Image (cartoon, grey):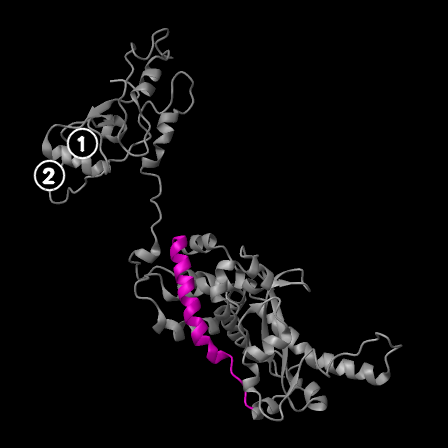
Amino acid sequence: ISGRMCAVIGFKNTQKRLNEWLNRECYDHKPATKRSCPCAPLFSFFKKPKDDYKSRMWLKALNLKKPPKNIFVCSFHFVEKKTDKRKSFSRAPTTPDDTETCLPPYDPATPMSRDAQTQWEDQTIAEHNYISKKQPINKEDKATQCEAENDPTVASTTVIDDDKSLLFTGVRKVQFFALVTSLLPFSKPSVQLPVVDQILMTLMKLRLNLLLGDIAHRFNVSTSMASIVIGHWIDVMGEQFKVLIPWLPGETIRATLPLSFKKNYPRTACVIDCAESSIQRARNLDSRSDTFSHYKSTNMVKYLVAVAPNGVIMFISDGYAGRSSDKYITMDSGFLDYLKAGDEVMRKVRSNIPAFTCRHGQLTNEEVTRTRRVANARIHVERVIRRLKVFRILSQTIPITTTPRLDKILTICAGLANRRGPLIRLPQEV
């Protein structure tokens, strides 16, 4: 008898706990103990019925992998804390509508919810409060259940105007929903989460670099499902967004040259620069050495960005280790394949660089003028890189687990940066 224990998973009602409670002094019937006073006991135990059908109903309701030989259930799992033919833990359906086979909920308003001796809430009752009718039902994964047609999506309550859209996705509201429409054919049929929420989830990861647990909580899905959805859409967008990074024809480039280029560099095809993003230090010593940048004194990843004079990103390379030189990235990335005879490229390391005073006296008037002209023209690529770094996944430390999809992330961010509108305003727009 002393070894009795409630078989319901998660409950700790034992015969030892009941004996300790019975040996206490009753507040209403001093000096009698609760065992000898007429007060009702805190709980009692009921043994599994011998009837075969009722016994199987008990085992089904308990859902135990390895049920013990002698099964006891405490009175907390029975209506009015007792068993009868009408309200029993193991009752069978008596009518077509009577299909209840689970544990009836416990009503916390019943007597004995407080210890009369201490006037504090009984801890035994508190442990079972989650069975109460007033407790909310556990959340279910929206990605694995059928969703009502009229349920509002997260996107409908998040992307409500251009400011919120720029904050969460990096593009304006109209452009966001246009992207959703174009990406609808690439959705996974097995995922029941609305496609607009799936794409919003992915863009929020790129734009704000939120933790997967935070994203899963916002969209009411599991962390594993959020990871699967984000990985799928990064793969899809990485391929589909390549069309958003076009190499402009020479006629288009010359027709859209800003005034700073028309006067001084009319034959410029693009402005290039290598951007850097910090990356998590790898455990492998060779990878750690390859990504370490002596200039930044940390582990970095580098990528080449080519910008048209009008501010459109025309080329972005794959990610390279931080030790790679700008010359090597330029030669290996395939950027030179886009250039034609007569095209001029402005970059930091060449003849078009600012003048320095090293081993010289004061700069001459010609050097000062040339430096200002180069700086005014080259500042546009810095502004484009700043647009890329708006996506915090590139401005913050990139996890090692993200590196397999880093090239596609660069393509997505560059494509979204091109969707934000012109970088350089025309004279009449200023």
What residue is rendered at 41% in x and 71% in y?
A: 236
Q: Is residue 353 left or right of residue 426?
A: right
What residue is rendered at 31% in x and 38% in y?
A: 133
**Image quadrant for the N terminus?**
top left
What's the magenta bit mostly, secondary-structure-wise?
helix
Percent across and percent down for residue 269 are 62, 87
Tell me, for residue 163, which label it has, or none: none
Instruction: Decide which of 407, 218 is in the foreground and name it.
Output: 407
Three-letter amino acid code at disc 1? Lys
Q: Which residue is mark 1?
A: 87
Report if residue 422 is visible in the image.
Answer: no
Label 2: few (<14), some or many (≥20) within 10 Å?
few
Percent across and percent down for residue 124 are 36, 26
Tell me, for residue 94, which label it has, or none: 2
What residue is rendered at 54% in x and 81% in y?
A: 334
Residue 224 colored in magenta in the image: yes
Which residues are the magenta region?
A: 220-249
Q: Quadrant of residue 426?
A: bottom right
Which residue in the rendered view is the most extreme toward the top? 31
What residue is rendered at 34% in x and 45% in y?
A: 138
Percent across and percent down for residue 61 are 21, 37
Residue 217 colored in magenta in the image: no
Q: CA distance from mark 2 to mark 1?
A: 12 Å
Three-letter amino acid code at disc 2? Thr
For the residues bearing labels 2 and 1, Cβ distance under 8 angstroms: no
Percent across and percent down for residue 98 are 15, 42
**Image quadrant for the C terminus?**
bottom right
Label 1: few (<14), some or many (≥20) within 10 Å?
some
Q: Quadrant of residue 311?
A: bottom right
